[in-house]
Image (cartoon, rainbow, N blue to C red):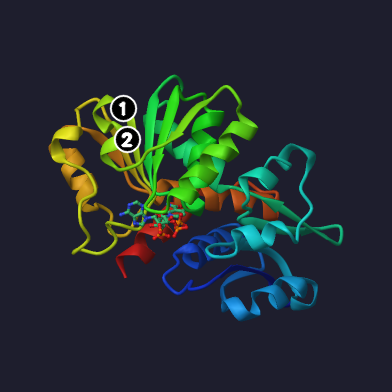
């Protein structure tokens, strides 16, 4: 058999990633001679790696922290993706007709999963955390015509930067930076998104007070390992509907797969692979 077409996940660190299991299962199910590998590249080597993509025999890439912004500078954007320059991140690269094209599948991936359970249109939303994933979530909520959005991050400059991004792309959208978690006014919100890594470790603190979680609040934690963070356990106890980030991971992966292969992604196969890989 000829050499498989090479795909991979560029990031640092990437050893914990479930993406190879998900994509290799999909390639196998569709009998495609393709392979997806981890591409751990330390920061000192990232520029060189991105400058020499052509010589590496790669057909497509996912990009994760800390390189989603850096990768943006190395790709051509389709006309309908020019807004990604303002969002500041691409997570999917594909080589088409000798040029590297960039996409962001985190944005539609989050929205597709959220909308299965909660429609953010005209809803009041809050996000804790203002890193790369938060930028995608904030864009997605504004695009879905949420009513308002408050964002808190310990690093106020990052939250301000998301508000500025939203003002530029959605001038009429009501977005503000909160000065503390308490200032998010979670009691008055319909949707709370955790976009921090707080909750990945058992000893992590809870960032919210139990009495802030009303039963009509939908709580979305971007974390998928553990499957139920302390925040989600509390939300469940308080009668809230909630979701972890496994569905976002699945949908962003399906959309990347479809960009690379032009074929419909095998959803059940990919979900099963994620669930199995997550157990190990
Ligand atoms: P990131 O760029 O490191 O952003 C996390 C942000 O949260 C940082 O700005 C961080 O501030 C802030 N933060 C940390 N502790 C905080 C606290 N106690 N209060 C307020 N803000 C706090 O990471 P990311 O890529 O955005 O990822 C965030 C989480 O989402 C991770 O758990 C990641 O695994 C998950 N994620 C899931 C998916 C999915 O498909 N489900 C996709 C992407 C990311 P400092 O930098 O000052 O610490």
- Residue 39 point in image, percent of width and height: 58, 75
Residue found at the very far top of the displayed protein: 122
Quadrant of the rendered image containing residue 108 = top right
Mark nearer the N terminus (1 vs 2): 2
- In this picture, is 35 found above or below 248? below
x 38%, y 66%: residue: 277
Left/right of residue 110 with respect to residue 171 in the rendered view: left
Q: Nearer the viewer, mark 1 or mark 2?
A: 2
Looking at the rendered image, the quarter that the C terminus falls into is bottom left
User: What residue sits right under mark 1 in the picture?
Assistant: 189
Q: Position of residue 209 (x, y in %)?
A: 17, 41
In the image, residue 147 sits, relative to residue 36, either above or below, namely above
Q: Is residue 109 visible?
A: no
**Mark 1: few, some, or many residues within 10 Å (few <14, many ≥20)?**
many
The residue located at (44%, 26%) in the rendering is: 148
Q: Is residue 231 among what the camera can see?
A: yes
- Using the image, determine if residue 37 lies above or below residue 175: below
């Amino acid at each position: 058999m000829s050499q498989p077409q090479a795909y991979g996940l560029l990031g640092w660190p990437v050893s914990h990633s479930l993406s190879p299991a998900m994509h290799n299962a999909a390639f196998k199910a569709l009998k495609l001679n393709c392979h997806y590998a981890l591409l751990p590249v330390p920061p000192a080597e990232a520029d060189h790696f991105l400058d020499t993509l052509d010589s590496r025999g790669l057909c497509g890439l996912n990009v994760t922290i800390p390189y989603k912004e850096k990768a943006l500078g190395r790709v051509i954007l389709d006309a309908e993706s020019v807004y990604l320059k303002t969002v500041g991140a691409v997570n999917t690269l594909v080589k088409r007709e000798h040029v590297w094209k960039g996409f962001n599948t985190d944005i539609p991936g989050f929205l597709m999963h959220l909308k299965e359970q909660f429609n953010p249109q005209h809803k009041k939303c809050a996000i804790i955390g203002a890193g790369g994933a938060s930028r995608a979530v904030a864009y997605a909520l504004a695009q879905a015509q949420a009513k308002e959005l408050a964002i808190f991050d310990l690093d106020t400059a990052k939250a301000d930067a998301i508000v500025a991004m939203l003002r530029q792309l959605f001038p009429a959208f009501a977005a503000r930076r909160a000065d503390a978690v308490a200032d998010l006014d979670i009691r008055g919100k319909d949707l709370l998104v955790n976009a921090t890594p707080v909750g990945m470790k058992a000893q992590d603190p809870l960032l919210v007070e139990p009495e802030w979680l009303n039963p009509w609040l939908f709580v979305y934690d971007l974390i998928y390992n553990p499957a139920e963070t302390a925040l989600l356990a509390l939300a469940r106890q308080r009668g809230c509907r909630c979701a972890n980030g496994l569905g976002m991971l699945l949908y962003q992966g399906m959309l990347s797969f479809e960009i690379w292969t032009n074929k419909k992604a095998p959803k059940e196969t990919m979900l099963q692979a994620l669930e199995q890989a997550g157990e190990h």
